[in-house]
Amino acid sequence: MIIDCHGHYTTAPAAHNDWRDAQLAAFATGGPVPDHQVITDDEIRRTIEANQLRLLTERGADLTIFSPRASAMAHHEGDLAVGIGWARACNDLIARVVDLFPETFVGVAQLPQFAGEPVDAAIAELRRCVAAGFVGVNLNPDPSGGHWTSPPLTDRYWYPLYEAMVELDVPAMVHVSASCNPSFHATGAHYLNADTTAFMQLLQGDLFADFPELRLVIPHGGGAVPYHWGRYRGLADMLKKPALAEHMMKNVFFDTCVYHQPGIDLLFEVIDVDNILFGSEMVGAVRGIDPITGHYFDDTKRYVDALNLSAEDATKVYSGNARRIFPRLDAALTKRGL
Amino acid sequence: MIIDCHGHYTTAPAAHNDWRDAQLAAFATGGPVPDHQVITDDEIRRTIEANQLRLLTERGADLTIFSPRASAMAHHEGDLAVGIGWARACNDLIARVVDLFPETFVGVAQLPQFAGEPVDAAIAELRRCVAAGFVGVNLNPDPSGGHWTSPPLTDRYWYPLYEAMVELDVPAMVHVSASCNPSFHATGAHYLNADTTAFMQLLQGDLFADFPELRLVIPHGGGAVPYHWGRYRGLADMLKKPALAEHMMKNVFFDTCVYHQPGIDLLFEVIDVDNILFGSEMVGAVRGIDPITGHYFDDTKRYVDALNLSAEDATKVYSGNARRIFPRLDAALTKRGL
């Protein structure tokens, strides 16, 4: 079984995005928020079958851990109430995808977050979504959208959310959204910077001493981290932290959203196979075909397959690690006899 | 000949740092800025001989392109006038190091920059330093120190500085300083994020169409960029830019400040050897000994040597590229018969 840990509903029906526009327009003018437009099951089926399901099948994966479009979370827009409404709408749409394709998609929730506001609304949405069968959340370390005004992930500001995550046994993928800072291109800078930043925040702190059960997936192959693994080992030493394996790597995991063979080779050379989850970020950041290989940049399964991992390691990367880190997914699959 | 393109005077005499403290205290209180304390040639000799010169010799390099301590530039402190005074003091100290060790060090200047202020002061200091024999500058793309309030490097805000650089035929290393944003550890996040961010800004824009002669070195092995080279090739395609080799790589160069063998292997696998300059960031970000190898993390020459480059390629990485990108260095070396 092959589980893609990182997929987004980037192809949601236009009516969904139209509602978002209307919601933000209402916020700007102080007018009433319009009702959701009706989106039929057929519309959802079409957007999935023509995109994620097609590509998943073509590339030979079985199941995607599926969340709302990351760049559209845009936690910096509006206020917390706007974010609550938008997160509910996005997550409800994910729930419908999962209902329509229960064998192929499992839900991960967008959280309502707003810089400077407490995390209570995020916890409430987490609980609502887990009750509906979701198995994880996307946690934005910078809800300001590129201004980085929130405290580091090791700050007690985040602790109530971590407590709920541990109680419910769900992990988070640490994933920023769009950038409203012109310095940062979203998928070319802000995403990777956030991955690097989150890792270093965790290295500087001792979060997992307080939350030994907390599990965080850092996407996009860990940002700059594996490429600079020597720097991080050295910094841990300079900051008088334990070795990274002990300090962080029972709790921190990287996906394989690295879009060329040399990058995947490096990832697997320096990071323990127990810490790597197959992912493609599909349909996502880079949609084109690599003229060098003739294959899609984001067809990351090709790169992983080319490693010729042992059967045991391949099982870890393709399903075992995901089932371990997302226990609610594991339980659901076990119930299905998988 | 082996040229290290990235060294900082991190070991400057205490009196230099004491003056900085006094300068900032005077700014805070509105009092007079104290005179510089006398620093003797012997003090400078001692700080260099015990550190940079010793390590350079031990590791088998010949010359360092040397600039003030990057993390202490702290452009966000004080105001522009404070930055002008501090840049002059730092650069004058570099000039003294170069005078004392003319065969081993060549100067690169710190620029006075302040977010929101024009770049005129930076241009004036650039001209002063080049007249004194400096061969390049360090350009901070985020003088706010982690708040990223300045326009992207492709913005016309920076153009007068680029015009002066082209006129004087000096390149810049794009190098941030300390972070005053608690989200970002300086050497573990802010530095690498800035490298990644700068590259993506250049990818999004068309700066080198306006300045075909401009040369920018992105340090720390290019941040996250080589590890995600497939992503950047794909983003160039999505943004309808030419291929990276044509769009950027006549003007953008990476150093080898990547502190483990797999990272250096990747860098040389994906980046053309004409775009890589040997550098160590020494004495710098990570000062310890790698328990795995028994050698200093930042002894990057070991990693490059282990590549077994052809003689031609090794010459490019160790000296040829640096001489091409820093023509004033090349002229000085040629004058010395080197």
Image (cartoon, coloured by chain):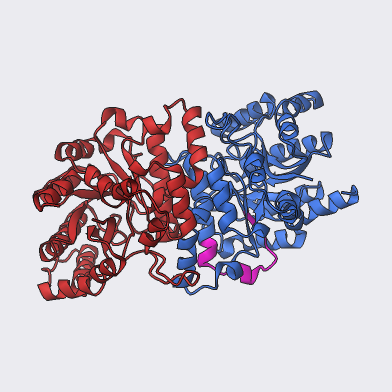
Chain colours: A blue, B red
- Which residue is located at x 13 percent, y 68 percent? B34
On the rendered structure, is B135 left or right of B285?
left
Q: Nearer the viewer, residue A314 or B83?
A: A314
Residue B157, given in percent of the width and then of the height, sits at 27, 36
Q: Is residue A17 visible?
A: yes
- Which residue is located at x 27 percent, y 60 percent? B7
Is B249 situated above or below B18?
Answer: above
Residue B22, given in percent of the width and then of the height, sits at 20, 69
Q: Which quadrant holds residue B38? A: bottom left
On the rendered structure, is A128 left or right of B313?
right
Magenta span has A216?
Answer: yes
Is A204 situated above or below A26?
Answer: below
- The magenta span reads A201-217
Total numbered labels: 0
Q: Which quadrant holds residue A164? A: bottom right
| Quadrant in the picture for the N terminus of chain B | bottom left
- Which residue is located at x 34 percent, y 46 percent? B313
Magenta span has A168?
Answer: no
Residue B286, given in percent of the width and then of the height, sits at 40, 66
Is A226 situated above or below A44?
Answer: below
Is B63 situated above or below B328?
Answer: below
